[in-house]
């Protein structure tokens, strides 16, 4: 895949970096949202979006396509809002907070199937 097409795909709300998914899985675990945690974990088991040849091969930067139902999207968004209100974070988000998480999930929740 060439860079322009890759960037276009990565900008779609249903594509998520491995890093972002890992952070969401961690937060959902802290909230005991086991079913949603399992759904996101399954996404990481799927093949990542094919990368351009000169892409850094860091798993955290690989992009994965989510295929969640509208209800699951809303449930994750609600849980992440709850996590933010409770002041929860992950080791990787402790300093920067959850900036961008809610906005990304809001965009995905509003996307038409």
Image (cartoon, helix red, strand yellow):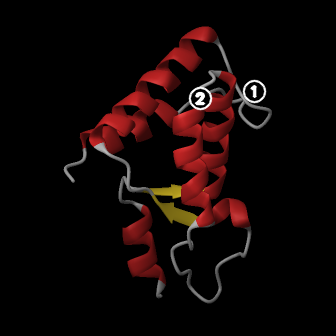
Residue 44 seen: yes
Query: Which residue is painted at 63% across and 57% down in the image?
Result: 18
Q: Position of residue 48 (x, y in %)?
A: 56, 71
Query: Which residue is painted at 34% across and 44% down in the image?
Result: 108
Query: Which residue is painted at 46% across and 87% down in the image?
Result: 2
Q: Does 104 sit above or below residue 74?
A: below
Q: Position of residue 99 (x, y in %)?
A: 55, 31
Q: Position of residue 75 (x, y in %)?
A: 40, 29
Q: Mark 2 Cα within 10 Å, few/some/many (few <14, many 20+)? A: many
Q: Which element type, helix, strand or loop, lies under badge 1?
A: loop
The residue at which mark 2 appears reads as 98
Q: Quadrant of residue 9?
A: bottom left
Residue 100 seen: no
Q: Does 42 sit above or below residue 55?
A: above
Q: Does 76 sit above or below residue 61?
A: above
What label does residue 34 carry, if any?
A: none
The residue at which mark 1 appears reads as 94
Q: Residue furthest left?
A: 112
Q: Mark 1 Cα within 10 Å, few/some/many (few <14, many 20+)? A: few
In front of the other: 66 or 32: 32
Query: Real-space Cα distance between discs 2 and 1?
Result: 8 Å
């Amino acid at each position: 895949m060439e860079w322009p097409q890759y960037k276009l795909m990565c900008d779609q709300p249903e594509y998520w970096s491995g890093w972002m998914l890992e952070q969401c899985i961690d937060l959902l675990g802290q909230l005991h949202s086991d079913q949603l945690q399992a759904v996101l974990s399954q996404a990481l088991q799927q093949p990542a979006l094919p990368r351009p040849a000169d892409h850094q091969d860091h798993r955290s930067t690989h992009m994965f396509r989510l295929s969640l139902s509208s209800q699951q999207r809303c449930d994750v968004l609600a849980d992440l809002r709850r996590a933010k209100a409770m002041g929860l974070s992950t080791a990787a988000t402790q300093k920067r907070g959850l900036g961008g998480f809610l906005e990304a999930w809001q965009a995905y929740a509003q996307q038409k199937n």
